[in-house]
Image (spheres, rainbow, N blue to C red):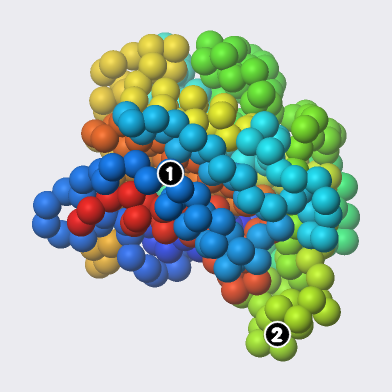
Amino acid sequence: MRTRTTRTTVAVAALVTALTLGACTAQTGSTPAASTSPAADEGAAPTLKPLDQAGLTTLFEETAKELGQPGAVMLLRTPEGDFTATYGVTSPGGSTPVSADDHIRIGSNTKTMTGTVILQLVQEGKIALDDPVSKYRPDVPNGENITIEQMLMMRSGLTNYTETLELNEALDNEPQRVWQPEELVAMGLALPPDFEPGTNYHYSNTNTVLLGLIAEQLDGKPLQQIFADRIFTPLGLDETSFPALEDSSLPSPYSDGYFWWTNVNTLASSKLPPDLLAAADAGTFLPNDGTLDNPSWAWAAGSAISTAGDLADYVEALVGGDDALLDPEMQAARMDSFQSTDPKDPTAAAYGWNIGQFGQFYGHSGELPGFNSFMGYDPVADVTLVVWANLAPAADGRGPAAWIARTLIDEMYTK
């Protein structure tokens, strides 16, 4: 969702094209950085290697250390067995070890929930994918030519409000500000569109906040209750929640989350300039604590809270299909909705109806200032991988959890 905001919900990008759809904030940028997607090379499909728990744990720890993370968690499920690994502590210089039970802000992984609710409403005949958004929101410029499906696919052309100077200045100056969803939408709609609807891809949190408002309009409930009724309770996700706008707390236990510099200074790039990068390496420039900053600016695009275990359960249901979420026909259509985020780049990730494809994995990544997470499921090999980290983005601009996930996936599969 990054700005740190741009970063996304689907914020929204440092895992390389392939694992970076998740930043909600500015730092992240709306377009993932180019890089090689795990298992995206042409040729035979990659195959899963025998599980090397010790080797993967070492690789996880080394990569987290390389990225300067205070703490990180990984959870891996394979046909050979399941295991979790933890690294470090909940805050820089702290002494409390991170735990696989810690709650974190999951950023743009929330987008998959908003998209799922919209698809449920399609099943119920309350909305159609080819409906123009103007049917529900007459205030959207050119809304008669923007479909609900294009908004799910990030192909509406609506500008990303989290890339605006207005929001990023406010996040720096008033981190506890309570944002109303309509304020967020207004920022995005006030800007010229990025392109004509359906002609390109641009990760925009404006799409998902609008979809959240439409879901409330059609279901007659607050989004917090919609998620609980339609997703969390049916799937037994007892450790997952969507906070009220004024609620900036995290359930216990939780990890703190830290970020570098400011939202405004990192609008153009998540990477620190050379002098600050050197100071960060030397320990003379320290990150900021964003743990309890109010996340309402991300709302339907990135405000949810969860744990590694709940994310694993959720992504398996999301990708593998669970009747509690979607019927088989809608699930099949969702899994057939993917289009490349960059047709000119064969290694680019693909994006569908608020869900991403990274090589053989399907799921999403997410980032809010201080927290980066990745959840993915490979339905062919029956492998689930969840990673989160608590200093995001890394000083060199990489999304730490997404990068760790990519590194682990590269090691787990033969090409």
Question: Percent x, y for residue 311?
Answer: 54, 32
Question: Percent x, y for residue 184?
Answer: 69, 47
Residue 336 is at least partly visible in this image:
yes
Q: Is residue 123 above or below residue 15?
A: above
- Mark 2: secondary structure: helix
Please tell me which residue is depicted at 67% across the width and 32% down the height of the picture. Answer: 101
Q: What residue did someone put label 1 on? A: 53
Instruction: Judge left or right: residue 348 versus residue 325.
Output: left
Q: Which mark is residue 165?
A: none
Q: What residue did someone put label 2 on? A: 278
Please tell me which residue is depicted at 23% across the width and 53% down the height of the picture. Answer: 414
Residue 137 is at least partly visible in this image:
no
Q: Is residue 361 above or below residue 193?
A: above
Q: Amino acid at mark 1?
A: Gln
Which image quadrant for residue 305?
top right
Front-most of residues 280 and 161: 280
Front-most of residues 272 and 123: 272
Which image quadrant for residue 241?
top right
Please tell me which residue is depicted at 65% across the width and 71% down the height of the picture. Answer: 395
Front-most of residues 208 and 253: 253
Quadrant (top left, top right, bottom left, bottom right) of the C terminus: bottom left
